[in-house]
Amino acid sequence: MHESLIKYINSYTSTPLADSEIELIKNTFAPKKIRKKQYFLQEGQVCKFSAFIVKGAMRQYTVDDKGVEHIVRLLIENWLAVDRESFVMLTPSIYNIDAWEDTDVLIITKPDSMDLFNQIPVLTEWRERLDEHHAFAAQKRLSASISFSAEKRYSDFASTYPEFLQRFPQHMIASYLGITKETLSRLRHQAVKK
Amino acid sequence: MHESLIKYINSYTSTPLADSEIELIKNTFAPKKIRKKQYFLQEGQVCKFSAFIVKGAMRQYTVDDKGVEHIVRLLIENWLAVDRESFVMLTPSIYNIDAWEDTDVLIITKPDSMDLFNQIPVLTEWRERLDEHHAFAAQKRLSASISFSAEKRYSDFASTYPEFLQRFPQHMIASYLGITKETLSRLRHQAVKK
DNA sequence: AAAATCTGTTGACAAATGATAACGGAACAG
DNA sequence: CTGTTCCGTTATCATTTGTCAACAGATTTT
């Protein structure tokens, strides 16, 4: 269960975790099952946990005045599900996070994670690298959203995250790209013709 | 010259910098003047410096096949001008960064910054807070770009960064919002009527 | 098994945005 | 001072995308 998390952390650091540190991590991250359609976080709640996805798929989204969902993130294995702002600042979240497939996660609270970072120095390196990685990805997605057409954004998405096409329905992909499901359907059929 | 940088760092940390640390910072960050329209970074170059803006205004942008500029970031006092991916990974940048006003910056290289972080532990706290802050902002901007109309994005932008409206021409604001200058012009005039 | 829901598609029309061109005034450079 | 470039606006028309509605097939629920 925890192996994939250990592997994930090690992939970001220069020194592998020691056995005692691994033990500590195993004792701090608690396994939890989240069934399809069940909420991990609901709008208005403080995001008390950060969840590492061992197996499954989730989505993070807002719901506007008209009841339309806007998906800001799609998440599968080896991603962290958390509204970071709410988690860090203890403010009510504006996002919902729920499971799209039956999902196994490892969860940790803010206080526990702070303890863990104090006890395992190499985790600081992990966090730095992870932050960098997220900053790069966010920059790219932002660039794309202001520079590219919907069609280009879709084809970039499809080649960057081919798995997502298999695991999430098209109306969720459309929402993630900021277009309607009808528009995405048309783009795909036009693309085929070319 | 360096006071605003010191103040900026202290605003993000729990413990103020010691005098010796301030001295070290002053000796490491080098002052530089960048005149209006001069490049700080050009597409294809590795971003060798990170620049703290003491006074002035800059913009970061890409240029597409058709020669159209897409502004991904507008920067003024107390912001860091840098393509982080290029700076960290030493890869050629896809961005241009140039000065819109005559600008005073404090620059630092990657090796120097690594030394500085090793010598002044509290800077690690600064970086963490800064990363968090950037992650929050990036998340919000992404949410906005997929969820909101151009009009709403503009009014959000105008209320979040009122200074920018004064200091950058409208065609740059439009590019930053991912719309054309004509569309922005229309949005503004419609908004007045309401 | 029957009913309900979900998913992807398509058509017709409306709304938003882009492309191009033209214009006047302001700012700037020689 | 004078010509040039830059900036914001407006008009017209084309393109993209959204909205609403309907439909069929698949899946889920009862």
Image (cartoon, coloured by chain):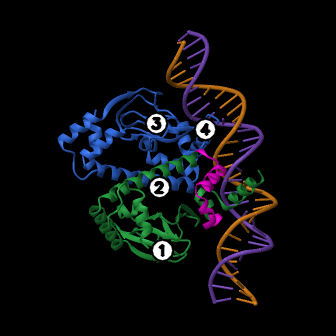
Chain colours: A blue, B green, C purple, D orange
Tell which circle, 3 or 2, labels the residue nearer the N-terminal end.
Answer: 3
Eyeballing the image, is A185 above or below A40? below
Label 4 or label 3, whichever lies nearer to me, is: 3
Spot occupied by residue A136 in the image (x, y as percentages of width and height): 42, 55
Label 4: how many Cα within 10 Å (few below 14, some 14–19, many 20+): few
Q: CA distance from mark 4 to mark 3?
A: 19 Å
Q: Which residues are magenta?
A: B147-171
Mark 4 in CB contact with mark 3 (< 8 angstroms):
no
Q: Secondary structure at mark 4?
A: loop
Q: For the residues marked 4 and 2, what is the alpha-carbon distance in whole angstroms?
A: 25 Å
Front one among C8 and B165: B165
The residue at the far left in this view is A19
Question: On residue B104, which mark appears?
Answer: 1
Residue annotated with mark 4 = A64
Q: Residue at x 25, y 49 (%)?
A: A121
Residue A56 visible from this viewpoint: yes
